[in-house]
C-alpha cells in the first residue's frame, strides 16, 4: 500500500527553495522514503549539485552593482563588491589569500537597480536642497536576498538534499528503536472538541512511554514546522498564512527558529542558534533591551565594548551606499563615517558640561550657554586659566617662519591676527560726503583727555594709553 504525502516548503531566499515528494512504501514491516528534488533548485542559480571551490549567485535582470556580505561561523564579517554586469560569486579562497574555514556561513546579497546618470544627478541635487522625496519614475527597490552555504574541506558543498528518516526493522508492527508505524492509513478526523489531559507528542520519532518532563506539547522528528493555514475566502477577512520553522532542512544548513510569512514568501523574524541570553527582551513597561533583561529606557543596548547603532543605506533603491555609526564608550560619544575611512567628524568627551553646545529655536548657537543671544554666543562663567577664548589655527608645518595661529583672542581680551585687519573704508561703500576743515578736527582731538590705564580684570602692570568712551 502506498500513502503519498507531498511537502513543499517555500523560503524567502531562493538558495533554500526546495520541494520534496515523499511516497511511503510499506512492505515487510519496513518504510522506504524517496526524496525527489525539483529542477527549480538548479535553475535558481543559488544551489549547486556538486562540491565546488566557488559559490555563484544569480544576477536578476535590470540590476547594476551588487554587495555581498557573509558572516563566518566565528562571527567575522566578509564584504565584497561587484560592478554592474560582473559575475557575483564568492570563492573558498578570498582575494587576499585567506582560506574560508569549514562550517556554515550566513550570506546577504543586495543589488542596485539601473539608474541613468541624469536622473541620479537630478535627485542628488534635490537631496542637497533638503528634498528627500523619490521621483515617480525612480526604479523600485530590489529586496535583499539571504541564505546559507556550507564549506567542508575547502569546498562549497551541495545543499540540495534534506535529511530523511532512516527506519529500523520493525518488530510486531513497532520499530525496534521505539516509534510506532503500523501499516495502513490511520488518519483520524474528530468532528468535536478534543481534550487531552496529559501531554502530546507529534512526529515520526515519538515513542511509547515518551518522557515529557514539563512539556505539554512536543514536536519530535527531523523536520519541524507549525503551519497556520487561514482558509478565509470571502469578503475582506484576513487570509495570510504563517509558519513557525525550526532549522533548515538542508545538509549543512543553519539552526534557527523563525516565523515565516508563507503567503508573502518572507521570513520577518529569525533567531539563530547560539544567540546569547536576553538578545531581545521586552519588559512589562514596553521597554526593549538588547543583551539586557533590565532595560531602563525605551531602547537599551548593553555590550562590553562600544555599544553601536549602525545606519546603513544600501544600493537596493538606487542611491549611493552610505554607512554611519552612532556609538559610545569610555572615551567618547561619537559619529563614525564608516564609508569614508571610518572618520569621526563628531565627538563628545565624557564630563562635558551642560549646554556645551546649544541651538535655539531661532537658530542661534550657544557654546556654554542654554540661551544664546546671538548667531554665535560663547559664554564661560570664568576666564580660561591659560587657553584663549577663541583660536583659529592651521596644522603646524614645523617652520618657525610661518604662523600656524591665524587668529587668537586671549583670556585678557587681546586679539592677535597673523595677517592684516581690513576695515570697510572704501569710497564705494559710503555716501553723503561733506568736506570738513582739518584744523577743526585737530583742535577737537587736542582737547580730548588722554589717560594711561589697565582693565579691571588685568594687573596694574598691563597698562594701556588712550581716551575713554565717556570723554
Image (cartoon, grey):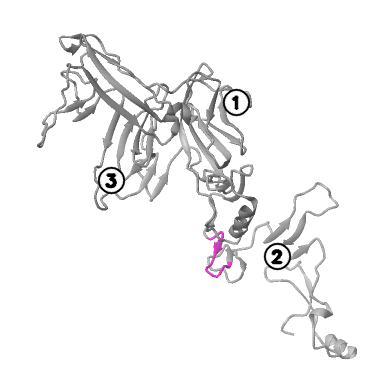
Which segment did they paint magenta?
355-364
Q: Residues within 10 Å of mark 2 (few under 14, many from 20)?
A: some
Q: Residue 105, can we see it? A: no
Check the image and name the residue furthest to the front.
Answer: 1
Q: Provide residue 50's location: percent of width, then percent of height.
A: 49, 18
Give SS at disc 2: loop
Q: CA distance from mark 1 to mark 2?
A: 62 Å
Q: Quadrant of the N terminus?
A: top left
Placement of 70 over or under 442, stated as above or below: above
Q: Residues within 10 Å of mark 1 (few under 14, many from 20)?
A: few
Residue occupied by mark 1: 94
| Occupied quadrant, residue 85 | top right
Quick one: label 1 or label 2, which is nearer the N terminus?
1
Q: Tell me whether circle 1 and circle 2 mark residues in contact (CB < 8 Å).
A: no
Placement of 375 over or under 35, stated as above or below: below
Q: Residue at x 63, y 26 (%)?
A: 96
Give SS at disc 3: loop
State whether the magenta stretch is mostly helix, strand or loop: loop
Q: Is residue 287 left or right of residue 464?
A: left
Q: Provide residue 174's location: percent of width, then percent of height.
A: 17, 13
Closer to us: 217 or 289: 217
Residue occupied by mark 3: 239
Q: CA distance from mark 2 to mark 3?
A: 77 Å
- The stretch drawn in magenta includes residue 375: no
Quick one: label 2 or label 3, which is nearer the N terminus?
3
- The stretch drawn in magenta includes residue 356: yes
Q: Residue at x 26, y 23 (%)?
A: 4
Q: Nearer the viewer, mark 2 or mark 3?
A: 3
Residue occupied by mark 2: 412
| Occupied quadrant, residue 321 | top right
Q: Provide residue 471's location: percent of width, then percent of height.
A: 75, 85
The circle drawn on residue 465 is none
Amino acid at each position: 500500500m502506498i500513502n503519498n504525502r507531498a511537502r513543499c516548503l517555500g523560503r524567502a531566499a531562493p538558495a533554500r527553495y526546495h520541494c520534496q515528494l515523499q511516497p511511503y512504501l510499506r512492505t515487510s514491516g519496513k518504510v522506504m522514503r524517496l526524496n525527489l528534488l525539483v529542477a527549480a533548485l538548479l535553475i535558481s542559480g543559488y544551489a549547486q549539485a556538486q562540491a565546488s571551490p566557488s559559490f555563484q549567485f544569480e544576477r536578476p535582470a535590470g540590476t547594476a552593482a551588487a554587495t555581498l556580505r557573509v558572516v563566518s561561523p566565528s562571527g567575522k564579517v566578509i564584504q565584497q563588491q561587484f560592478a554592474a554586469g560582473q559575475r557575483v560569486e564568492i570563492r573558498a579562497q578570498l582575494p587576499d589569500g585567506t582560506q574560508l574555514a569549514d562550517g556554515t556561513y550566513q550570506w546577504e546579497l543586495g543589488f542596485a537597480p539601473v539608474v541613468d546618470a541624469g536622473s541620479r544627478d537630478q535627485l542628488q541635487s534635490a537631496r542637497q536642497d533638503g528634498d528627500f522625496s523619490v521621483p515617480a519614475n525612480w526604479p523600485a527597490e530590489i529586496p535583499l536576498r539571504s541564505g546559507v552555504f556550507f564549506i567542508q574541506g575547502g569546498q562549497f558543498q551541495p545543499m540540495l538534499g534534506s535529511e530523511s528518516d532512516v527506519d529500523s526493522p520493525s518488530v510486531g508492527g513497532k520499530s525496534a528503536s521505539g516509534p510506532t508505524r503500523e501499516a495502513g492509513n490511520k488518519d483520524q478526523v474528530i468532528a468535536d472538541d478534543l481534550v487531552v489531559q496529559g501531554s502530546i507528542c507529534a512526529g515520526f520519532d515519538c515513542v511509547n512511554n515518551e518522557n515529557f518532563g514539563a512539556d505539554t506539547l512536543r514536536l519530535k522528528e527531523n523536520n519541524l514546522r507549525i503551519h497556520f493555514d487561514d482558509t478565509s475566502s470571502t469578503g475582506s477577512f484576513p487570509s495570510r498564512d504563517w509558519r513557525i520553522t525550526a532549522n533548515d532542512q538542508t545538509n549543512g544548513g543553519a539552526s534557527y527558529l523563525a516565523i515565516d510569512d508563507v503567503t508573502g514568501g518572507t521570513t520577518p523574524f529569525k533567531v539563530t542558534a547560539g544567540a546569547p541570553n536576553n538578545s531581545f527582551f521586552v519588559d512589562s513597561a514596553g521597554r526593549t533591551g538588547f543583551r539586557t533583561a533590565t532595560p531602563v529606557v525605551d531602547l537599551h543596548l548593553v555590550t562590553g565594548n562600544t555599544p553601536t547603532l549602525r545606519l546603513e543605506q544600501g544600493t537596493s533603491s538606487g542611491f549611493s551606499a552610505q554607512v554611519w555609526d552612532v556609538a559610545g564608550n569610555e572615551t567618547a560619544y561619537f559619529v563614525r563615517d564608516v564609508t569614508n575611512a571610518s572618520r569621526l567628524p563628531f565627538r563628545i568627551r565624557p564630563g562635558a558640561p551642560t549646554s556645551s553646545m546649544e541651538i535655539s529655536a531661532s537658530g542661534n548657537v550657544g557654546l556654554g550657554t542654554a540661551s544664546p543671544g546671538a548667531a554665535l554666543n560663547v559664554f564661560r562663567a570664568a576666564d580660561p586659566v591659560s587657553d584663549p577664548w577663541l583660536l583659529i589655527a592651521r596644522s603646524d608645518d614645523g617652520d618657525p617662519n610661518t604662523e600656524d595661529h591665524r587668529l587668537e583672542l586671549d583670556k585678557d581680551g587681546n586679539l592677535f591676527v597673523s595677517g592684516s585687519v581690513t576695515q570697510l573704508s572704501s569710497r564705494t561703500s559710503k555716501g553723503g560726503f561733506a568736506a570738513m576743515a582739518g584744523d577743526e578736527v585737530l583742535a577737537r582731538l587736542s582737547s580730548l583727555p588722554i589717560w594711561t590705564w589697565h582693565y579691571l580684570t588685568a594687573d596694574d602692570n598691563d597698562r594701556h594709553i588712550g581716551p575713554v568712551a565717556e570723554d
